[in-house]
Amino acid sequence: MYWINGIPQAQLPLADRTIHLGDGFFTTARLLDGDIPLLAWHLERLSLAVQRLLFAPLDADALRREMLTVAGDGGDGVLKALISRGSGGQGYSFSGCGAPVPVLAGIKHNNRLEQVLISAHLERDAAHETLVLDTKGGECASTNLFWRRGYALAEVAVGPEALATADKVFITNALLPIVPVKAIDERHYADRTLYLQLYPLC
């Protein structure tokens, strides 16, 4: 099912900037029994993207109502809310619809070519996930990475070398509440204690 501006339909205008330039952003939510877990967090993510990409203010209340309406059909599933700047502007400029901004970290903008290429490499190598590094750290291609060593709780900046001495590693995202990592390269993780404790809470 596809909704565009609150109306059930499945066609975007050919001039829409998200088609030509990826000029938009999105969030993907899990549906559970007609509800949207972490809905406030998803709306906060969209609000952040609005600010960083200089979009017109988002009617968060209306979007929340529409997302809950879709979810209200009942059952489990996946909901993707995609916000486009719409049609207009000339070339890359969005004058008449705003100005490019380089601060893209932390938002899920519609240009996901990097993730598409990462997924292609994963399929080629028959791997499930990969650790993608940036200039300040790293993250998975489509999930969040957590690791445990010992039992003291701390938030610290570490590099990928920390995984070589971890007792347990697991990944999460909105659609995969928690998935244990069995191995990274030649390093295997047999300890499932933390996973078994957390899984019932997800």
Image (cartoon, rainbow, N blue to C red):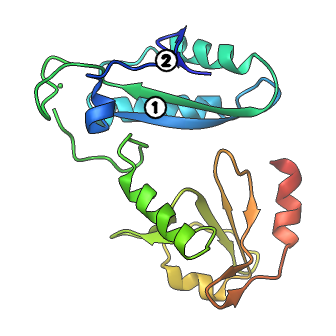
Q: Which mark is residue 11?
A: none
Give the percent coordinates (x, y) of residue 13: 33, 18
Q: Residue 97: x and y, percent?
A: 21, 19
Q: Which residue extends farthest bottom?
A: 186
Say few, some or many: other residues with alpha carbon within 10 Å of mark 1 (under 14 / 14 to 19 / 20 or more): many
Which residue has dot 1 on it? 46
Q: Nearer the viewer, residue 197 or 114?
A: 114
User: Could you classify mark 2 by the number of other residues whose Cα lies within 10 Å: few (under 14), some (14-19), or many (20 or more)?
Assistant: some
Query: In the depicted view, which residue is nearer to us: 74 or 122?
Result: 122
Q: Are marks 2 and 1 in contact (CB under 8 Å)?
A: yes
- State the residue in front, 108 or 119: 119
Which amino acid type is marked by label 1? Leu
Query: Looking at the picture, which amino acid does disc 2 mark?
Result: Ala
Q: Quadrant of residue 117?
A: bottom left
92 with respect to 188 (left or right)? left
Q: Position of residue 194 (x, y in %)?
A: 82, 68
Residue 86 locus on image (x, y percent):
30, 20
Q: Could one spot residue 168 in this view of the protein?
A: yes
Q: Which residue is mark 2?
A: 60
Q: Secondary structure at mark 1?
A: helix
Snapshot quadrant of residue 12: top left
User: Where's the N terminus, which quadrant?
Assistant: top right
Answer yes or no: is residue 31 visible: no
Residue under the image location 40 percent in, 35 percent down: 25
Left or right: where 32 falls relative to 78: right
Q: Tag 2, which secondary structure?
A: helix
Q: Would residue 108 be found to the left or right of residue 128 on screen?
A: left
What residue is drawn where x is 74% and y is 80%?
150
